[in-house]
Image: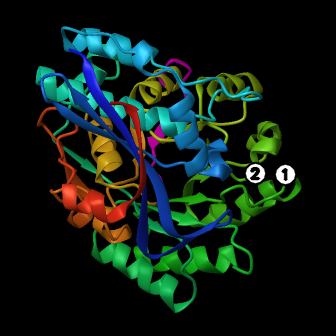
């Protein structure tokens, strides 16, 4: 089945409130949305969320890369979903000079890959959970419901106490706390939050590269009495090798995020012994299939993994994450589906935001299982580029 049209949209969506962490403060999001139309009329959408401080991508670099890449020449005429998956996994974008980590086009590739998977899923009547079953059967385990984590970002003082009460009242089982923000007392903050959420709440922390290698072990040790279960990306990527010695000084497992964007990163982390866990995020890791390959690698090498999300992703990426979460076993922590809590436009005609307790139901319809509203897309699009017309 041939791809007849492929269109990339730059979409800009205001957030309901500013999201602040040690690396960045964000009040709106610039995403790329790709629409794919097949010869039989099947339509698919994919989304990528470029972040310069993660994969070195901006919205402009993503749009330029998509225009410059020879996408059409890589697309054949698959006659089954299996053939489509084989074709889609091989799709690549124009190489970027100096990209030794092989990650600087990942948001662009994610948007393209998901659009193709969604379209061919509709064409052949397959949901994205089938991708896991077919390409990573050893990871496959379908579950009808999954449970997402809550998050406390920049709240402090009374707002932090209120956020903690909300997490408990909403009956989350796990929460992530952002730490390392300048001017914040992390020990005092975590002590206050732990007191309010109770002893049973699983709390992990995310430093977003805030600490220097010389202070990281002490910072973690100060927070360990409050029962933290992992520490995410405590140092800058350029200093990631320091985590090998830091791991020997602390009891808490270390998770890579900004330093885990590709298979190159994964292999280096194993070689240098820099982590215990991967934070896999579909956009920063290049799409659904590359993320599956990273989960396979982690499992094969006795590493844990979580499925993370990007601040500002819409229901398109949320739906892809839901399919991943409901079909991949062994996910330690789950983030995402914040749709109506974060973005002023979710794009989808259905609301798939997690429900009370963080619960989210499996999507069983073909493709992504959500439809993009034409009116919503019109409201948020900044520009469009026809890749195949």
Q: Does 14 appear above or below 124?
A: below
- Residue 135 tag number: none
Residue placed farthest to the right in the image? 214
Judge from the rendering whether residue 178 lies leftward or rightward of residue 355; answer left or right: right
- For marks 1 and 2 on the same chain, the one whose residue lies earlier in the sequence: 1
Q: Is residue 47 above or below residue 389?
A: below
Q: Which residue is more in the foreground, 87 or 227?
A: 87
Q: Residue at x 32, y 35 (%)?
A: 324
Quadrant location of residue 347?
bottom left
Q: Determine whether 129 is above or below 214 in the image.
A: above
Does the residue at mark 1 contact the one at mark 2 (Cβ under 8 Å)? yes
Residue, x 36% and y 15% (percent of image)? 75
Residue 343, percent across and down? 36, 67
Highlighted magenta segment, given as a residue range:
299-311
Residue 120 visible in the displayed image: yes
Kindly identify which residue carries mark 1: 213
Are there few (<14), some (14-19), or many (20+) residues within 10 Å of tag 1? Answer: some
Identify the residue shown where x is 64% and y is 47%.
Answer: 54
User: Of helix, strand and loop, which one carries label 1?
Assistant: helix
Q: Position of residue 251 (x, y in %)?
A: 67, 48
Front-most of 98 and 319? 98
- Residue 251 in magenta? no
> In this figure, which residue is indicated by the disc labeled 2?
235
Quarter placement of the N terminus: top left
């Amino acid at each position: 089945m041939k791809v007849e049209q492929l269109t990339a949209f730059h979409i800009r969506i205001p957030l309901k409130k500013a999201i602040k962490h040690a690396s960045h403060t964000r009040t709106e999001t610039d995403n790329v949305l790709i629409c794919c139309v097949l010869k039989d009329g099947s339509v698919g959408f994919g989304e990528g969320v470029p972040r310069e401080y993660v994969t070195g991508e901006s919205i402009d670099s993503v749009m330029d890369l998509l225009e410059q890449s020879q996408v059409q020449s890589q697309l054949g005429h698959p006659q089954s979903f299996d053939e489509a998956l084989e074709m889609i996994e091989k799709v690549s974008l124009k190489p970027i000079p100096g990209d030794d980590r092989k990650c600087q086009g990942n948001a662009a590739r994610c948007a393209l890959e998901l659009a193709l998977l969604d379209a061919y899923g509709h064409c052949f009547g397959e949901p994205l959970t089938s991708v896991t079953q077919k390409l990573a059967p050893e990871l496959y385990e379908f579950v009808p419901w999954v449970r997402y984590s809550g998050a406390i970002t920049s709240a402090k003082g009374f707002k932090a106490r209120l956020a903690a009460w909300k997490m408990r009242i909403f009956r989350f089982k796990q929460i992530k706390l952002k730490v390392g923000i300048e001017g914040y007392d992390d020990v005092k903050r975590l002590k206050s939050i732990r007191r309010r959420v109770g002893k049973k709440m699983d709390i992990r922390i995310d430093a977003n590269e805030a600490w220097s290698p010389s202070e990281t072990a002490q910072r973690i040790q100060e927070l360990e009495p409050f029962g933290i279960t992992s520490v995410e990306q405590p140092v800058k990527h350029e200093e990631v090798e320091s985590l090998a010695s830091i791991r020997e000084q602390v009891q808490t497992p270390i998770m890579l995020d900004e330093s885990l964007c590709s298979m190159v990163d994964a292999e280096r982390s194993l070689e240098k012994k820099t982590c215990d866990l991967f934070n896999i995020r579909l956009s920063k890791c290049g799409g659904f299939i590359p993320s599956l390959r990273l989960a396979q690698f982690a499992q094969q090498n006795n590493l844990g993994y979580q499925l993370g999300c990007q601040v500002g992703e819409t229901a398109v990426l949320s739906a892809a994450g839901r399919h991943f979460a409901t079909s991949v076993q062994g996910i330690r922590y789950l983030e995402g589906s914040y749709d109506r809590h974060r973005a002023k436009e979710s794009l989808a005609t259905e609301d798939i935001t997690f429900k009370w307790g963080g619960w989210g139901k499996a999507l069983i319809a073909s493709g992504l299982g959500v439809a993009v509203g034409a009116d919503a897309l019109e409201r948020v699009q900044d520009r469009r580029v026809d890749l195949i017309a």
